[in-house]
Image (spheres, rainbow, N blue to C red):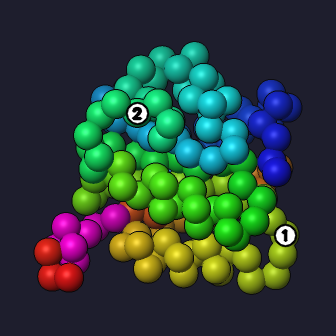
Amino acid sequence: MVQLHSVPNREQVIDTMIGLTRLSNLHRTIVAGNDSLELYLALRRRGFIRVATTATCRILKGQHSVGLITGQNSLRAIEAALVEISQFLSASAAIAVLIDSRESGFCLKVRTRLEQMGFRIEAGVRCQQGLVLSAYRQGFAQMENAA
């Protein structure tokens, strides 16, 4: 499990996620993963007041424009967090996922899973704690209506 306890490393991951998703104070943001509470608190300290965890969210599903996932160390855990967070995201949402595994092909598996969920990969940035992968959902509502 990735620990966000090291302040410089945690700040680097948060800065990267904010930059990749173009997060602003106006966006509703949902966070998930083992370190979601810590990420939630760090975002609140930075002035992001429209942020919630999947456990504490009281807003209707499909209303969040940004999702952030951190603290995962296995493909199964990341997939579970993706499934959990996807129901909260709007049809044109952005997502950033911290991938801490150095396992061969791991990033490709996460990328494939994101694409299966209607996301288009936009960027990947290497941090000290791993890789932050960002993606955007475009035309997802059309895909849901067709299904």
Rendered location of residue 56, percent (x, y): 47, 30
Q: Residue at x 72, y 55 (%)?
A: 72
| Residue 125 visible in the shown view | no
Q: Nearer the viewer, residue 43 or 125?
A: 43
Q: Residue at x 26, y 40 (%)?
A: 60
Going from N to C along the chain, the mark reached first, 2 or 1, is: 2
> Against 12, is 50 above or below?
above
Q: Is residue 84 magenta?
A: no
Which SS type dominates the magenta stretch? helix
Residue 102 numbered tag: 1
In this rendering, the count of numbered labels is 2
Rendered location of residue 24, percent (x, y): 39, 32
Q: Find the distance from the CA under tag 2 to the CA under tag 1.
A: 32 Å
Mark 1 nearby-residue class (10 Å; few <14, some 14–19, many ≥20) = few
| Res 77 → quadrant | bottom right
Q: In the shown orientation, is residue 23 left or right of residue 73?
A: left
Q: In the shown orientation, is residue 59 left or right of residue 74?
A: left
Residue type indicated by callout 1? Arg
The quarter of the picture where the C terminus appears is bottom left
Q: Which residue is mark 2?
A: 57
Q: Nearer the viewer, mark 2 or mark 1?
A: 2
Magenta part of the protein: which range?
A: 137-144
Residue type indicated by callout 2? Cys
Q: Residue at x 64, y 80 (%)?
A: 109
Rendered location of residue 111, percent (x, y): 57, 75
Q: Is residue 140 magenta?
A: yes
